[in-house]
Amino acid sequence: MLLAVSGGRDSVTLLDLMCRAGFDVGVAHCNFHLRPGDCDRDEAFVRHLAANHSLPCFVAQFNTVEYANAEGLSVEEAARRLRYRFFEEIRMREGYSLIATAHHRDDAIETFFINLLRGSGIAGLHGIPQRNGAIVRPLLPFGRDEIDAYVASRGLQYVEDVTNAQPLYLRNRIRLQLLPLLRDISPSFDAVMENNMQHLADADTIYQGRIEELKRHLCVDGGKGEEEQGGEKGRAVVINISELRKCQPLPTILFELLRPFGFNSAVSAQIAASLDAQSGRQFFSPTHRLVKDRENLIITVSQSRSDNTAQQQGDSCLLYEDLDYRSLPISLSISVFGYEGKVPRLPKNEAWFDKGKLLFPLLLRRWRDGDRFRPFGMKGTRLVSDLFSDLKLSLDEKENAWLLCNGDGTILWVVGHRASQFAAIDHTTKEVVGFKLWR
């Protein structure tokens, strides 16, 4: 078992109990560099503590403020993400079965009120789970007073985080100001809260069963918006508004559908109130974007993530005649073959052109307002934006559209939608260049 040890009284208690119980343990510590001098002191204390118990010690140092600013997170949330990512890396690399943290009953009660104030829904009102995947919390049944008594009886040494006594963060204000008042009002407050959280956990199990049924009915794989997310393809999710309206209470159900995508209750309420609004309304969570598109709500990776992907891939690239296209930002395959006098009926994701009429290098780029082309079979030109309107493309589809252009800039193909008349195959064609978009 890998123990998360900060050096404070709770984690020192956890370490002492685990060693006395005979568990095979290692120590993991994070130096967040948030308290000049104190963080280095805590790291040195934990290293010394692990050495005294002859335990392996793994330490990570983070520039937490820089990470929080880069990711748009609070310092608390940034530290939490960095901490658990590091613990899991060590667990996997070193072969530990579980990660044990020193959360106790008071932490669970504090989390209840934090989630209550943030409007997290019923899922946030049963405190901290005893186990979550590989993470276990052996001290959860015990309160802070019991831990203090254990520390005193064992004469354990620990370091004190001075910020714990300062109302700098929401958790501290709840711990220092709200909970003492509630305990003064009700001497049995802790026992009552423990029962309340258990009842809410049971109710949530029943509630989530119904929500899962609705998700399977209402949330459809949109099959588009495939940006990289966490190493996997993040596909668009589509919710039909007409079907959603049949579900009551609609605001609560919509919140539960959107919560896995990072939308909070306030934004979910705004979305619910905008169901009758015109198409194009957009709403954002830290990770996703929701667009109202006619009778659908379309959820994709947020625009900021899409922008980052576009910048990494480039908004345009050149295609040379040697056909080395491995670095393209979309899955486009190319083949060159002799013309046999007949062009089959091609699906939208394929386009053929007369190689002799092309000027290399070709250009693959994102479309822009004002782009015009001559669709195959038409005499005049038309705006690419008008084509998108006729095809009833969603905002996400428009933003991820690409154009294949000749070397002189003439648009050859609105990729995956419509080919141009330019460089069309005729009786003079000897070689064909065929393109195929793979989704």
Image (cartoon, grey):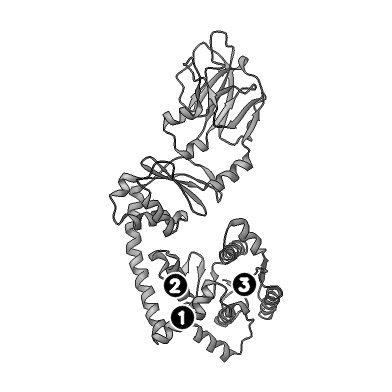
The answer to which of marks 2 and 3 sits earlier in the sequence is 3
Amino acid beneath label 1: Leu
Mark 1 and mark 2 in contact? Answer it, CB < 8 Å: yes
Q: Are marks 3 and 1 in contact (CB under 8 Å)?
A: no
Marks 2/3 in contact by CB < 8 Å: the verdict is no
Q: In the image, which disc is placed on residue 62?
A: none
Q: Residue 366, relative to residue 136: is it above or below?
A: above
Q: Residues within 10 Å of mark 2 (few under 14, many from 20)?
A: many
* Viewer-proximal residue among 252 and 353: 252
Tag in front: 2 or 3 = 2
Q: Is residue 318 left or right of residue 418?
A: right
Q: Is residue 311 visible?
A: yes
The image's mark for residue 179 is: 1
According to the picture, the residue beneath numbered tag 3 turns out to be 26
The residue tagged with tag 2: helix, strand or loop? Answer: helix
Amino acid under disc 2: Phe
Residue marked by disc 2: 113
The first of marks 3 and 1 along the sequence is 3
Disc 3 element: strand
Against 362, residue 357 (above or below) is: above
What distance separates the C-alpha of mark 3 from that of mark 1?
34 Å
Q: Position of residue 116 (x, y in %)?
A: 42, 69
Looking at the image, tell me whether mark 1 or mark 2 is earlier in sequence order: 2
Q: Position of residue 157 (x, y in %)?
A: 64, 85
- From the image, which quarter does the N terminus lie in? bottom right
